[in-house]
Image (cartoon, grey):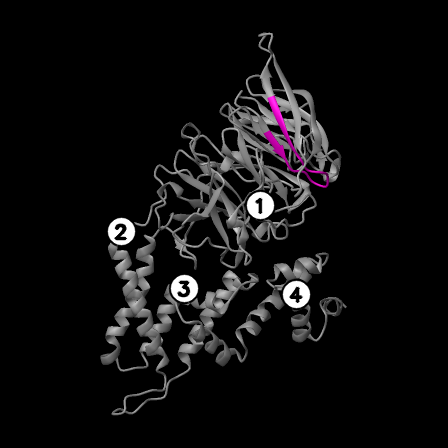
Amino acid sequence: MRYVGYLQYLCIQLNKRDMATTRPNFWLAILLFLLPTAARGGTADTIPSGCPIVKVEVEQLPDLNIARAGHQVFCVNGEYVVAGGHTDGFVPTPTAEYFKDGEWHVMQMTYSHDVGISAKLKSGKVLIAGGCEQPSGIGQTFNAELYDPETHSFRGFGILQRKRTWASALELDSGEVVIAGNWYHNDGIEMFYEAQSAKGDHRYRQSFTYIRDVATQRSSPIIIRIAKDDALIFGPYGIRGDTVRTAYAYRLKGDSVHIPLFETWQPISAGCRQIDASFIGDEAKGDFTYLVPVKDSTGQVAIARFSGTEASLLPTACTIPMTNKGDSIIYCNITADRQSGRAYLFGLSKHFQTQQDNTYNYILCIDYAHASDKDAPMKLYYTDPLEMMPDFSPILTPEGHLLIAGGLRNGSNFTPAKNVYLLHVGQPKAVEARSAGRWWIWAGLALAGLCIVGIILMLRRRKSCDTAMECAPVSDEPANELMSLINELMDKEKPYLNSELKVSDIADAFHLHRNDISACINSQMGCTFAQYINRYRIEYAKELMRRQPDKKISSIWMESGFGSEQTFFKTFRSATGLSPKEWYLQEND
């Protein structure tokens, strides 16, 4: 639609000139219209960063028996399993479910584990421990148990050395499990170990051993292996949700390690439940490589590649997209598929806690196995708005797809969900890399760039004429047409809901220079770009207050696209002469 509208705009402008001199330019305009479609191959859109965007096929599986959030999800013994978490009313549930023969089967656990720890063990069992002690996410627990997938049973066996919630666990090659992290309680590092009885009676003994305190305490830390018996521990959040900014990581065996990359890029973690999911190395070859999402001070996200204690940014074919059609993307954790050489960075809509019916799930596919010294191809998948939002990163299925089971309705812990979805991201072939053999695309894009320059220069010659010819007056019709297209874009796609929207984003949508957009809005609307955008935001805020009178002002200004509460109040009063509360009272008087 955008290309068609812009082509119409070009045709109107070209018709104002002598066709004998503009006919070649007309065909250049046609070429400009066709080339982006050819470059996309007719299968995917593109966003300003240059990353293809594709709608993913979503398959809805049978619902869980019990609505839950804050739970553990894993695939063991070929079965999907959900364990613990809390159910309706934010009440912990001591139950689990496994998926077999097309339905979910309920199991009784020994304890409840709401936002607890889980780690798949080499023995085939799963360690589950810790969690909130009371409803509403209050307190921590010591309790630990093991899940046996062969018998579909749980067995409580002991307690952690320190009660925990929002912690992380990772098994080393030795069979020892590193445990670290906490929430509103002291952090520290401890180890879990399961050993066969010395009596040879096929029994096992399990024990937790406290290793040491830590100077920088964290919640949901990232733990990665750097050797068979060693690990690094780091993360962006403290035990009270505060931001931890440090360029150092704890080493399980040895002193803290300085990570130069962390001087400018900070790791991203959002409560990763399967902490080893981002491993892309090869244990047999002693290759302990992980992919970790990071962000800089501006909020731009990138992918860090850790090999041992060395970290560097993974070269990618384009910058990671942070927005899509006016929707900001909040990225979480990475799930790697080592068999296909792809990794998936999961993302949520900025509105996942406020606009449930208008939010999307995002999966950024990174073809790391085909990365050269120049770039790794990427593709952004998105879903239609789902009936719930997951509160954990999807798990990888044996078929190479991603599974979401349970989560939150309306962004609230008091209304968890039963929904289960399978995201069909698995492909028989890796994401198509940029190919040097497809030279015609690059040649065409280069030609398109020249066309853009030529056409824009031509359009700017509204009042100029050759010294030997008389210049005819130029009508305002082209500007009127462009303004109509901009208004249509605002009404249909609502890019103004993105608080970081810039005039260059609108210009990119029509393949124009930002000065052309600013000049058009100024001449047609009599205001600046910022004033024009804020008009839409104010009207959107008014509509929210009409439809949802109980909604908090803090939610209204964020959902309406304003960058701060102060800007919202100032703009609202300037537009209406009233504060939001005064306006609402007057509206309902």
Residue highlighted by disc 1:
248
**Residue at the limit of the structure toward the front, as seen here:** 255
Q: Quadrant of the N terminus?
A: bottom left
Residue type at numbered disc 2: Ala
x and y, in percent, of residue 238 in the image: 66, 45
As for residue 179 lying within the magenta part, the answer is: yes
**Residue at the limit of the structure toward the left, as seen here:** 20
> Do the CB atoms of the residues marked 2 and 3 lie less than 8 Å apart?
no
Viewer-closest of 222 and 77: 222
Q: Is residue 573 above or below residue 382?
A: below
Mark closer to the observer (3, 1): 1
Q: Secondary structure at mark 4?
A: helix
Q: Is residue 553 above or below residue 81?
A: below
Q: Secondary structure at mark 3?
A: helix
Question: What residue appears at the point 26 percent right and 91 percent down from the top-left corner?
Answer: 469
As drawn, the label of residue 542 is 4
Range of residues picked out in magenta: 178-193
